[in-house]
């Protein structure tokens, strides 16, 4: 059993930032900083939620949800996040891709409890 | 080492369909059908790629990329995919969420080989 579940979000429109990545070998300070960034991001104005998974093949897929472009830009330029992004290129990632997308519609399903 | 890497995509705009889910217990025919659906989807007009991961906490995050709304709708209504989506609600998922989003910008990074 698990407590994980998809992020709870308001009705669209909102923004999704899809981040997919392969890490370099070793931790190199990644885990602690990633945890700090998640906490910081969650406290930013306009942050709506995050869904993240890393598979056995090493591909990490993280989708963060934001109210608007302004909140994405503010987080991107945050005094602690901006230098952390630089460390990502220097140390932590072999390759990554970022897709910034406007969510136009959304729906979900939860199994009825019987 | 791994051969996994983020999907290679054209320049925006294109669409991303973010699917996040928690599975029910057991396989119940899921793995075989999921593999079939991935092969089928990959052959559809307008399919651009997919990034997927399932974490140790059970959350699966799958992002498929499509040229336009029409290609998403065609796949949604595909004669083999539509009944498979019904099975998802009947058998395979405790909960899921779908976000359909238009990618407005994208960028990436690959570590230089030295």
Image (cartoon, coloured by chain):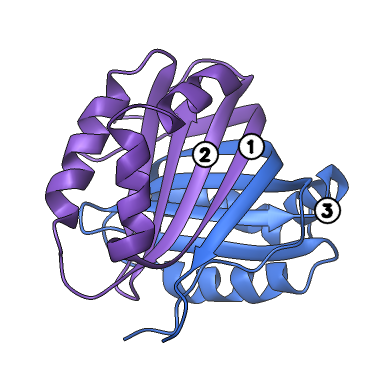
Chain colours: A purple, B blue
Q: Regarding mark 1 in the picture, which secondary structure is present there?
A: strand
Q: Which residue is mark 3?
A: B71
Distance from Cα at disc 3 to Cα at disc 2 = 22 Å
Distance from Cα at disc 2 to Cα at disc 1 = 6 Å
Q: Which residue is mark 1?
A: A101
- Judge the density around disc 3: few (<14), some (14-19), many (≥20) Cα neighbours within 10 Å: some
Q: Nearer the viewer, residue A84 or A4?
A: A84
Q: Which residue is mark 2?
A: A17
Q: Nearer the viewer, residue A74 or B93?
A: A74
Q: Chain of mark 1?
A: A
Q: Chain of mark 2?
A: A
Q: Nearer the viewer, residue B109 or A53?
A: B109
Residue B105 rendering spot, x and y as whole percentages: 68, 43
At 77% from the left edge and 74% from the top edge, which residue is drawn?
A: B43
Dot 2 and dot 1 residues touching (CB under 8 Å)? yes
Upstream in sequence: badge 2 or badge 1: 2
- The answer to whether residue B31 shows anywhere in this view is yes
Using residue A12 as the reference point, say whether residue B19 is left or right of it: left
At 47% from the left edge and 29% from the top edge, which residue is drawn?
A: A65
Q: Chain of mark 3?
A: B
């Amino acid at each position: 059993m698990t407590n994980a579940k998809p992020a709870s979000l308001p009705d669209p429109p909102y923004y999704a930032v899809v981040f997919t990545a392969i890490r370099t070998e070793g931790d190199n300070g990644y885990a602690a900083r990633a945890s700090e960034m998640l906490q910081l991001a969650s406290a930013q104005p306009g942050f709506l939620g995050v869904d993240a998974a890393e598979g056995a093949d090493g591909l990490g897929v993280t989708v963060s949800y934001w109210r608007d472009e302004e909140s994405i830009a503010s987080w991107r330029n945050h005094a602690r996040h901006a230098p952390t992004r630089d460390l990502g290129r220097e140390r932590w990632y072999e390759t990554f891709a970022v897709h910034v997308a406007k969510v136009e519609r959304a729906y979900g399903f939860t199994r009825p409890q019987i």
